[in-house]
Image (spheres, rainbow, N blue to C red):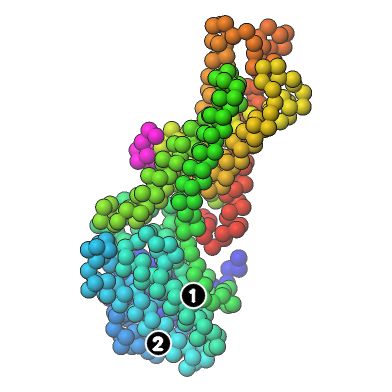
Amino acid sequence: MSTKQRLEGKVAIVTGGASGIGAESVKLFAENGASVVVADVQDELGHQLTASLAPHQVSYHHCDVRDEKQVEQTVAFAVHKYGRLDVMFSNAGIVGSMAGILDLDLNAFDKTMAVNVSGAAATIKHAARAMVAANTRGSIICTASAAGSVAGSGPHAYTTSKHALVGLVRSACGDLGAYGIRVNCVSPYAIATPLTCAALNKGADEVEAIANSSANMKGISLKATHIAEAALFLASDESVYISGHDLVVDGGFTVLNPLWLLATRFTSFLVMAVLLIWDSVKYSATIFYYYTEWTFTLVTIYFALASVVSAHGCWHNLKPEHEAEADYLRRDLEESMSSKTATFKGKETWGSMKLQSRYAEEEFLQRAGFWGYLMQIIYQICGGAVIITDIVFWCVIVPFLSIAHLKLSPLMGCMHTLNIAFLLVDTALNNLPFPWFRMAYFVLWSCAYIIFLWIARACGLSWWPYPFLELDIPWAPLWYFFLAVFHIPCYLLYVLIVRAKHKILAKLFQDAFLRP
């Protein structure tokens, strides 16, 4: 990207600019050549911020956005001091009451709406007036929220206000486009700003940990600087033809619905359970001498356990806020696992990512407990097992081997198709990691099957389910070695499938995937 300052010669106002997202935006706007007016009610913080920057370039002006007169005076101050107004970043807002709908205080509700909606309306109105009067093709940006895209991810008043704000932005866009004025909003996921920490009565590290555990994008924490960079883009001429847009910076949080995952998992479990029962009734329990049936059973167990975990996550997501203080930040239980969903450049970043993934996984083990961790391990075993099972079945058994003990049938073909099909659908929807070291569990799973066969032979089983596993053939050691090594490319293939999913989704949902 060009090294030219992206806001050179422009004048901006940032409401709520004394701390959090606003303060980071003030710094970034100033670094990119803009003259900035910090508008806030936190006078001490505002003066400290302006004192730390170039005094001729950044000024502070007290402004309570609930008072339209103060908003009008702030705009007049900026125009008088710097001669024009090019950018209005309406960032002031409050979280408001955390009470559930049954205990909702309407006075507190009105206060939240007054700041988040009426205050934004006042800033849009008076900024637009100044721009129109000066024939300035300006940019107006509002801070909305991921809560403005999905219900249940924030307190009632806050969620209502952010939905209304997105509507206000789109409505104003239609009115101001005739003057060449762009109106957009940026919607962040949860950030450990002073506002959020005060609302939850928690420290920044604790709020960030809660947000990270529920986030879709793993390996990176959303910071105020990321939102400032999004606002900088909307303020600059790089977005000259973008208006009425809600730039969601949430790492994909709002595009994923846990109910879809629950529905697909439960449907997969029912279909596979029916097929497994049908297969066992038709061919008797001897089917479990085959690795195919072991794999199919394991995938069925995974979908059963995953359905329970997803149901638990949906229950948490739908609980009233007063039942769990910070549950509005949580999603599906498995989403607290580490995942590499972005492209990382450089060895230093990659090493940092692996360290963060380790901490995220330890945190998951503490929160999810035994059953959640077991679900993760079974999923990763299934990934390698269905690949090796289907390759052997479709590429070796069907074309080359005659099965004397179990005739091929449409049922067998159906089972070998559905197990990987259902698992791929689940992979597309979930956010479970697929690290290399988990291949050890896949190998142990296959070893358990081999040991089971050896024990069965020692106890009187007179035949081998797969001819190439017979111990009395000359090439038995070589066959066993080959099958052991063959686990590596099979597991690698599923690793590549998971990584390909991340790249494809990042391209399809560019606005919703945060890149480091």
Is residue 104 in the magenta section?
Answer: no
Q: Nearer the viewer, residue 181 or 75?
A: 181
Residue picked out by circle 1: 184
Residue at figure coordinates x 53%, y 23% from the top left: 444
Q: Which amino acid does label 2 sit on?
A: His
The image position of residue 252, as x and y in percent, is: 50, 56
Q: Where 511 sits versus 76, above or below?
A: above
In the image, is 158 to the left or to the right of 437?
Answer: left
Decide whether residue 370 is among the magenta residues: yes
Name above or below for residue 72 compared with residue 40.
Answer: below
User: Quarter-wise, where is residue 107 in the image?
Assistant: bottom left
- Dot 2: within a 10 Å radius of its alpha carbon, few (fewer than 14), some, or many (20 or more) residues? many
Marks 2/1: CA–CA distance: 16 Å
| Front residue of 427 and 398 | 398
Image vertical order of residue 413 relative to residue 163, above or below = above
Circle 2 residue: 126
Quarter of image, res 283: top right
Q: Give the range drawn in magenta.
A: 363-371
**Lateral position of residue 94 relative to residue 430, left or right:** left
Does residue 52 lie above or below 321 as drawn? below
| Residue shown at 35% from the left, 54% from the top | 318
